[in-house]
C-alpha cells in the first residue's frame, strides 16, 4: 500500500507530459501568427513617424542656418553644414552653429537622409528617406518619405 501511494505521488510531481507541452506550443504559435503581423505593421508605422519627426527637426535647423548664412546648404555641402563650419572664411563668419545638438542623425532604418538643395532662392530644401530597403522607390515600408520642397509625402518615387 505504501509503495502505491509513493508511486502516485511521484507521477503527480514528474512534470508536464509531451501532449501538454505540444498543446501549449500550438497555442503560442497560433497567438503569434495572429498578433505578429500587427506588431510588425505598427513598428513600420512608428519608423515612418520617427522619420518625419526627424526630417521636420532637420528642416527647422536648416531654417536657422539659412537665416544666419542667407542661403541653404548646397547639394555638395548637404546636411553636414548643420554641424560643421563651412570652409569658406566669408561664410564661416556668419555661421552660428552647430545647429544640431548631435551629429546629423540617420533615418530609422540606419541610412543617411537624402538632402536636395532648392532649385532657386525662393524654394525650400527637400529632405528624404529611402525607406526600409534603402533604394529609390518601393511600396509599403519600402517606399520613400520626403519632407520639405514642394511637398511632404510618403510615396513611391
Image (spheres, grey):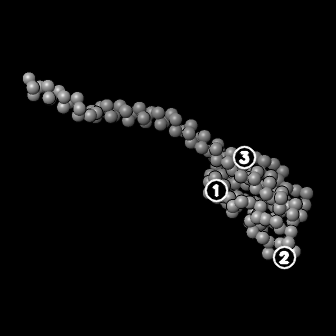
Which numbered dot is residue 89?
Answer: 2
* Circles 3 and 2 in contact, beta carbons < 8 Å: no
Mark 3 Cα shell of 10 Å, populated few (<14), some (14-19), many (≥20)? some
Q: Which residue is mark 3?
A: 154
The x, y position of residue 105, in whole percent, is 68, 58
* Circles 1 and 2 in contact, beta carbons < 8 Å: no
| Kind of element beneath mark 3 | strand
- In depth, the one of 153 and 55 nearer the eye is 55
Q: Which residue is mark 1?
A: 134
Q: Earlier in the sequence, mark 3 or mark 2?
A: 2
| Kind of element beneath mark 2 | helix
Q: Tell me what residue is drawn at x 9 percent, y 26 percent.
A: 2
Which picture quadrant has residue 11?
top left
Which numbered dot is residue 62?
Answer: none
CA separation in Å, label 3 and label 2:
39 Å
CA separation in Å, label 1 and label 3:
14 Å
| Kind of element beneath mark 1 | loop
- In depth, the one of 157 and 26 nearer the eye is 26
Which picture quadrant has residue 94?
bottom right
The x, y position of residue 127, in whole percent, is 76, 56
CA separation in Å, label 1 and label 2:
36 Å
- Is residue 28 found left or right of 73 in the rendered image? left
Nearer the observer, disc 1 or disc 2?
2
Amino acid at each position: 500500500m505504501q509503495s502505491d501511494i509513493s508511486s502516485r505521488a511521484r507521477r503527480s510531481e514528474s512534470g508536464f507530459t509531451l501532449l501538454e507541452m505540444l498543446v501549449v506550443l500550438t497555442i503560442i504559435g497560433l497567438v503569434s501568427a495572429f498578433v505578429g503581423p500587427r506588431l510588425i505593421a505598427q513598428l513600420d508605422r512608428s519608423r515612418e513617424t520617427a522619420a518625419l519627426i526627424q526630417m521636420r527637426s532637420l528642416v527647422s535647423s536648416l531654417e536657422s542656418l539659412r537665416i544666419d548664412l542667407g542661403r541653404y546648404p548646397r547639394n555638395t555641402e548637404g546636411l553636414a553644414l548643420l554641424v560643421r563650419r563651412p570652409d569658406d572664411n566669408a561664410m564661416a563668419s556668419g555661421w552660428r552653429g552647430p545647429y544640431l545638438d548631435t551629429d546629423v542623425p540617420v533615418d530609422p532604418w540606419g541610412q543617411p537622409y537624402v538632402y536636395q538643395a532648392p532649385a532657386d532662392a525662393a524654394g525650400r530644401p527637400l529632405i528624404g528617406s529611402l525607406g526600409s530597403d534603402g533604394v529609390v522607390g518601393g511600396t509599403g515600408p519600402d517606399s520613400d518619405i520626403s519632407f520639405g520642397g514642394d511637398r511632404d509625402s510618403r510615396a513611391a518615387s
